[in-house]
Image (cartoon, helix red, strand yellow):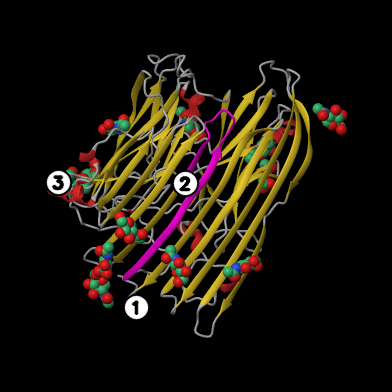
Amino acid sequence: MMLWSLTAGSLLLALFSLCWGAALVDFQVAQPPPVPKDAKQCTVQIFERVFAFSFGDAEVVDYTPPTDCGDPGSWAAVTLNFTVTSNGTQFDRLGILTFQNVEIWRTSTPEPTRGDGIIWTFIKDVTRFTPLFAEPGTFIMQLDNLIQPGLDGNYSTVMHATFFESSEENPPAGQANTIIPLSTLANDTGNDASVPPAFSLNVTLPQNTVELYAELFASGNGQEEFWYFNAANEFLDDLPNGVALGQGPFREVRLLVDGQVAGVAFPYATIFTGGIIPTAWRPITSYGALDLPTYFLDLTPFIPALVDGNPHNFTIDVISAEQDHTILQNWFVSGLLQVVTDPSGQPTTGNITSYSAGLFPITTTSGTVSNNGDVVINVTATRSIHVEADIVSGSGTTTHVVWSQDLQYTNIQSYLDNTDIQNVAQLSSGQVSSVHNGAPAVVDTFSYPLNINLTVLTPDGSNFTAIFDHSYDRVLTPAPFILGSTIHNHQVATGFFHTASTGNTGNGTNNNTFTYEDTAGNTFNRQVNAALNVITFDQQSGNLAPAPEPAALVAPSMNFDSSGQVRFPGNRVIGV
Ligand SMILES: *[C@@H]1O[C@H](CO)[C@@H](O)[C@H](O)[C@H]1NC(C)=O
Ligand SMILES: *[C@@H]1O[C@H](CO)[C@@H](O)[C@H](O)[C@H]1NC(C)=O
Ligand SMILES: *[C@@H]1O[C@H](CO)[C@@H](O)[C@H](O)[C@H]1NC(C)=O
Ligand SMILES: *[C@@H]1O[C@H](CO)[C@@H](O)[C@H](O)[C@H]1NC(C)=O
Ligand SMILES: *[C@@H]1O[C@H](CO)[C@@H](O)[C@H](O)[C@H]1NC(C)=O
Ligand SMILES: *[C@@H]1O[C@H](CO)[C@@H](O)[C@H](O)[C@H]1NC(C)=O
Ligand SMILES: *[C@@H]1O[C@H](CO)[C@@H](O)[C@H](O)[C@H]1NC(C)=O
Ligand SMILES: *[C@@H]1O[C@H](CO)[C@@H](O)[C@H](O)[C@H]1NC(C)=O
Ligand SMILES: *[C@@H]1O[C@H](CO)[C@@H](O)[C@H](O)[C@H]1NC(C)=O
Ligand SMILES: *[C@@H]1O[C@H](CO)[C@@H](O)[C@H](O)[C@H]1NC(C)=O
Ligand SMILES: *[C@@H]1O[C@H](CO)[C@@H](O)[C@H](O)[C@H]1NC(C)=O
Ligand SMILES: *[C@@H]1O[C@H](CO)[C@@H](O)[C@H](O)[C@H]1NC(C)=O
């Protein structure tokens, strides 16, 4: 086990040895991908692209699988390295990476600084998409950036893929037989759909499908970026105009198959780097901002109804706790199906023996409006899904499948002191599991507490401060053939922000405690704190921790420029 740390003493030393003129190193706390250390590696460049004015102009490139690290698809692991620099003034932007018409990575951009600019690298484990990498095809990177007066930051990007050769010690990664997109199938832009309206497409499954797992991508954008701060409609009139958007704070992402709910997700709230206090997310982004979490469902119980050789209607939508369940614009959604087929080639048969899933969750909305104008709103939701089926493979094996989801949600919004204080305390949690003949297949036990206290300091809203305290606690196995992991991250960030026509200023602190372990015995722990753009404490341990590199500990920058571009809940004008 390796352990290294940075203390106040070595920080001082490091500060003295800073070279002015180097870019600020931004990052999201995450585990290094669990890849074999001793395997032969083959790295290929996927694309290199400067996203300047790139709205509607995605990067579209051909891909050919490498053959010098074993037969395509026989790899032990596959990772992507996305490295980006930026210099100037710019908003955070969403990045949607589509490969073979399947979304495989949703990311976003840290906001740049002026002058020396920023650089970040995220290494993503894409081993579970091995069937896609085994074939020639197309990558599409959609990163819609705008250059206009006041916004001049380009994102200069390069993406590489690294393939790890398999061997006796490092066997080929577990994988599905095929992956089917639940996407728009566009060939010139990211393959996510904007909902509402609900997104539907026809899917025809192989008739010998014996296991079926879905992965869903979903993030709120536009009026839905701060969905957890959206106020329940019945209290909107009690709040000053513009303080909050409507449709309430609850969101459920649903997957319907032929009009029936097959599974749902209570999404994690990703805060992008322009979120409320841009300087709180520099150089450490909000957890998830560079690699948005996704959601996993076991659709195996529905196979008997789907293997007739005909197209079936798969729908992804996002609903609220309002009476009509509608939301504002917009959520970007997509998904994919990991399909396991029976080697006999013979059609699968079977029956759903039990189905219990409402079209909508059970929700409550209540609240109080005080004489002094204080408004406190309480929204809750619970969701229970239970499906059982017997699946008979063409080879003659019968599998009893039990799929269940038990999810809980609470959200308390407090608007106090004439709404100068806006607090949200949200908790999404749940137990998701599927069992195949007694053996766990999909496991997802999660808890996503989100607490934000926002205080507006000046009547014109130009000065404000916030504290963010949120966690990502998740025990997850996406499918039996995909590595399971347990992640705990706790992040507390604070900051002050001032908007002005002469340039925004601000400051921030950001403390993270992260632990990772997986079912193959890999571990990684990191505690890292930042204040005013500088890493003040960094301790990493576990068998995935990199070799000590004390020189790289402190972001080599004295760049206190904090001209972040703020995104704010509600729709009132902030500052000037
Ligand atoms: C990721 O890519 C960047 C840019 O090509 C490179 O400098 C860096 O060393 C790579 N990181 C890893 C871990 O491969
Ligand atoms: C940042 O951009 C400016 C032009 O806006 C350029 O003069 C400067 O060299 C750039 N800095 C770096 C580090 O690329
Ligand atoms: C952004 O890219 C455009 C086009 O490539 C270029 O003209 C401009 O100078 C770049 N901006 C900065 C700040 O480097
Ligand atoms: C891309 O999609 C468009 C519209 O669906 C279609 O007309 C075009 O032929 C497609 N191009 C390729 C190369 O598949
Ligand atoms: C799916 O296919 C059916 C015909 O089999 C067609 O009526 C329907 O419009 C298609 N739906 C979608 C979403 O493409
Ligand atoms: C697919 O299912 C959705 C959800 O039930 C429904 O709104 C839509 O009309 C269906 N599409 C087709 C073509 O049947
Ligand atoms: C499914 O149910 C039907 C009707 O009850 C029955 O005839 C059939 O044997 C069942 N199939 C399996 C695989 O259980
Ligand atoms: C919120 O509402 C739920 C359901 O009515 C209730 O159980 C809970 O106690 C309420 N929470 C608060 C803080 O009022
Ligand atoms: C707002 O913040 C700025 C920058 O810190 C400060 O100069 C200014 O005095 C503040 N305004 C008020 C009204 O407090
Ligand atoms: C937000 O304010 C509430 C009420 O004052 C307090 O209970 C809570 O701990 C605060 N949350 C954070 C993250 O500071
Ligand atoms: C951030 O700036 C505000 C306003 O000037 C100040 O009160 C606060 O102490 C600063 N925070 C840090 C961590 O320096
Ligand atoms: C972050 O950690 C530092 C110690 O490195 C501590 O002084 C500070 O109070 C912490 N900040 C928050 C908001 O917990």
Of residue 161 and residue 37, the one placed in the foreground of this image is: 37
Looking at the image, tell me whether mark 3 or mark 2 is earlier in sequence order: 3
* Left or right for 364, reference 163: right
If the image is split into quadrants, where does the N terminus sit? top left
Of residue 81 and residue 404, the one placed in the foreground of this image is: 404
Numbered disc in front, either 1 or 2: 2
Q: Secondary structure at mark 1?
A: loop
Q: Which mark is residue 459?
A: 1
Indicate yes or no: mark 3 CB to ligand 2 under 8 Å.
no
Q: Give the amino acid at mark 1.
A: Pro
Q: Is residue 182 above or below residue 457?
A: above
Answer with the quarter of the image where residue 511 lies.
Answer: bottom left
Instruction: Report if the CB atoms under discs 1 and 2 are less than 8 Å apart.
Output: no
Q: Which mark is residue 325?
A: none
Q: Is residue 355 above or below residue 233?
A: above
Q: Which residue is mark 3?
A: 18
Q: Secondary structure at mark 3?
A: loop
Q: CA distance from mark 3 to mark 1?
A: 40 Å
In magenta, the rendered stretch is 463-487
Residue with the most extreme bottom position:
371
Crowding at mark 2 (Cα within 10 Å: few <14, some 14-19, many 20+) = some
Answer with the quarter of the image where residue 376 lies.
Answer: bottom right
* Left or right for 503, reference 369: left
Looking at the image, tell me whether mark 1 or mark 2 is earlier in sequence order: 1
Q: Which residue is mark 2?
A: 488
Q: Position of residue 136 (x, y in %)?
A: 45, 21
If the image is split into quadrants, where does the C terminus sit? bottom left
Q: Secondary structure at mark 2?
A: strand
Q: Position of residue 523 (x, y in %)?
A: 43, 36
Quarter of image, ligand 6: top right
Answer with the quarter of the image where residue 480 lies.
Answer: top right
